[in-house]
């Protein structure tokens, strides 16, 4: 696993997640893009995760590079992602990214939101 360390905040990317993000970024064909991970109000349980490619940095963004993947998190989201792990699975039951967040006290049935 690779670790993104920020001011008191840690978000861990598994090797599979870093490899998949690299593959997707290569398909986009822009060297200016990076992965933004965010937590937004909403979803069945109170918060939902958001991940997307972005090219715009804000002054207080927390950024780092892991296995060649630049990951950016806004400060409010970073506080909710302490100790979280971003993983990617590719299998018969479906493929996709998932976040295992030890700060989540409750999750919903869809697996896309937490509180």
Image (tube, grey):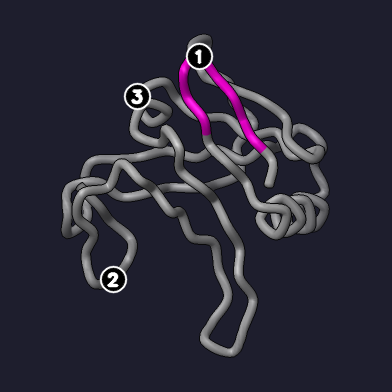
Q: Name the foreground residue: 40 vs 99.
A: 99
Q: Residue furthest bottom?
A: 92
| Residue identified by numbered label 3 | 76
Residue 87 image offset from top left, x and y in percent = 58, 57
| Residue identified by numbered label 2 | 110
Figure quadrant of residue 41: top left
Q: Name the foreground residue: 77 vs 53.
A: 77
Q: Name the foreground residue: 4 vs 51.
A: 4
Q: Which mark is residue 65?
A: none
Q: Earlier in the sequence, mark 2 or mark 3?
A: 3
User: Is the residue 32 above or below the residue 85 in the image?
Assistant: above
Please state the extent of the stretch shown in magenta in the rendering. Answer: 3-10
Q: Is residue 59 left or right of residue 17?
A: left
Instruction: Tell me the CA gap for discs 1 and 2.
Output: 31 Å
Dot 2, how many residues are within 10 Å of its Cα: few (below 14), some (14-19), or many (20+)? Answer: few
| Residue identified by numbered label 1 | 7
Dot 1, how many residues are within 10 Å of its Cα: few (below 14), some (14-19), or many (20+)? Answer: few
Q: Earlier in the sequence, mark 3 or mark 1?
A: 1
Instruction: Tell me the CA gap for discs 2 and 3.
Output: 24 Å
Dot 3, how many residues are within 10 Å of its Cα: few (below 14), some (14-19), or many (20+)? Answer: few
Residue 110 image offset from top left, x and y in percent = 28, 71
Residue 106 image offset from top left, x and y in percent = 19, 55
- Foreground mark, 1 or 2, reads 1
Mark 1 lies on a secondary structure that is: loop
Mark 2 lies on a secondary structure that is: loop
Figure quadrant of residue 81: top left
| Magenta span: chief secondary structure | strand
């Amino acid at each position: 696993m690779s670790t993104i360390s920020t001011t008191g905040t840690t978000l861990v990317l598994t090797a599979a997640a870093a490899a998949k993000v690299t593959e997707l970024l290569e398909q986009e064909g822009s060297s200016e893009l990076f992965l933004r991970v965010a937590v937004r109000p909403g979803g069945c349980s109170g918060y939902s995760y958001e991940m997307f490619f972005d090219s715009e940095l804000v002054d207080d963004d927390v950024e780092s590079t892991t296995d060649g993947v630049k990951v950016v998190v806004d400060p409010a989201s970073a506080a909710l992602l302490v100790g979280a792990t971003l993983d990617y699975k590719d299998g018969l039951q479906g493929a996709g990214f998932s976040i295992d967040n030890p700060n989540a006290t409750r999750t919903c049935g869809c697996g896309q939101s937490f509180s």
